[in-house]
Amino acid sequence: MKEGSSGMVTRLLDNRKLLLELIIAAVLLSLSINLISSSILDLKWISPLCAFVLALILAVICTTYFVARLLWFRTHMYTFRGFIIFHSKKNEVADIPRYDYGHDLHNYMQAAFAENAAIKRIWDKEPVDKGFHHDKETGKVSHRIGKGHQLVIEATKYYVLENLSTHLTDYFNRPDFDKKNLHTFARNDIPDVLLSNRFLELFSKPMEERTLFSAEDGAPSYGGEVVMAMGNGGAFYSRFDLTLPKGARIWRSKSNAIVIDTDRFALTIDVDFGGFGTVIPYKYQRHILGLDPHECHDYQISVRFTVAFKFASLFLPRGWGYYRWIESFMGSFESVFSEDRHFMDIVWESARTLIEYHEKQKSLADAKRSQPDAALDGESAAASSPPVS
């Protein structure tokens, strides 16, 4: 993450105090410039035209400085870097225990393959490990983002929306928020986002419209409505809802990023996955995942959040409690997605020390077991040798 999310809104609100200070400074500065220019003209040191040009230049410099100070903290960018382990022999994204994103991504892929044969064909035809091509004749290496990469991007965006949905539900489920000031977006409220994400479209589709779900399939529900369910063959259903302050809008940008526009700020969500590798700690695949490292490819994937506060928000003193979820969500998402956070949470350095200790003990035990066998072989060879005359 490039910058801390803690106090993002607080820093913006502090700029309101800065605004008042700048206004006072601007008034004093304008008065001083006026007095100085009048004195210079009375002394006839410079012509009125030169005085006007000088005053104009100073005014532009001061205005630029004031505006820059006001706009400096209005845009924040947060980039979280996660990782994917692709098992080339099985042609699947590996399930990574205790890594929420890795576990959910594996489940999303398997659920989509179980229900949608077209998605499975795309994945089998263009898996993520085929992004680089080496031309043996020319020696050149080419790279392209294939359809398999696009599936990972869409599944990751769905993961972000699911986490944001849960976070917002928990955040606004408090008595100090007036439900009249909130609006819950459902599946049909975001048609352009829905059509651009095959996982969102599939997993949020009503169960009665899906053949792998029967009337008996069910899961925890709220208010009599099913929230989440698992169907036959691994099919997955999750009701989509996104609770936001009234006046918010959701759409898809020209670059396929998801934009959540509120009265105070605009949040842009984008995913970067080009099939470039990352360095996973040695022995992690074999000892934690039980996989052969030679059959695995490790990839880096990034989720980028851009929070752009609106200029008018500087002049709105109340109602910020409805928007502070953006701060807590950044911290929450980092804990479930960040590669560095994952290895810190599982205390990898301590785990690696234990792994190396047990490997050494096993090596010593194997060596001790082999020594008696070697001695017995030597005795047998000596007994079978003919006596020397």
Image: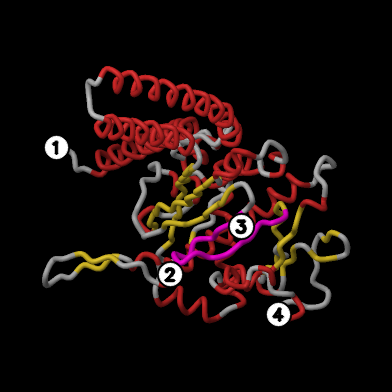
Q: Residues within 10 Å of mark 4 (few under 14, many from 20)?
A: some
**On the image, numbered disc 2 is attached to which residue?**
148
**On the image, numbered disc 4 is attached to which residue?**
210
Give the answer, above or below, for where 284 lies relative to 256: above
Give the distance between the C-alpha atoms of the residues marked 1 and 2, in whole angstroms: 74 Å
Please state which of residues 81 and 185 is positioned toward the viewer in this rendering.
185
Residue 302 screen position, x and y as percent: 44, 51
**On the image, numbered disc 1 is attached to which residue?**
388
Q: Earlier in the sequence, mark 1 or mark 2?
A: 2
**Mark in front: 4 vs 1:** 4
Q: Quadrant of residue 115?
A: bottom right
- Which amino acid does the dot numbered 3 rest on? Leu
Q: Earlier in the sequence, mark 4 or mark 1?
A: 4
Please state which of residues 139 and 71 is positioned toward the viewer in this rendering.
71
Picture disc at residue 161 = 3
Range covered by the magenta-colored residues: 246-261
Residue 37 screen position, x and y as percent: 33, 24
| Secondary structure under the numbered disc 1 in the rendered image | loop
- Which amino acid does the dot numbered 4 rest on? Arg
Q: Residues within 10 Å of mark 1 (few under 14, many from 20)?
A: few
Which residue is found at the position 59% from the left and 49% from the top?
Answer: 100
Which residue is found at the position 45% from the left and 54% from the top?
Answer: 84
Confirm or deny contact between disc 1 and disc 2 (CB under 8 A): no
Give the distance between the C-alpha atoms of the residues marked 3 and 4, in whole angstroms: 22 Å
Give the answer, above or below, for where 360 lies relative to 338: above
Give the answer, above or below, for where 383 lies relative to 186: above
Q: Outermost residue toward the right?
A: 224
| Secondary structure under the numbered disc 3 in the rendered image | helix
Please state which of residues 217 and 158 is positioned toward the viewer in this rendering.
158
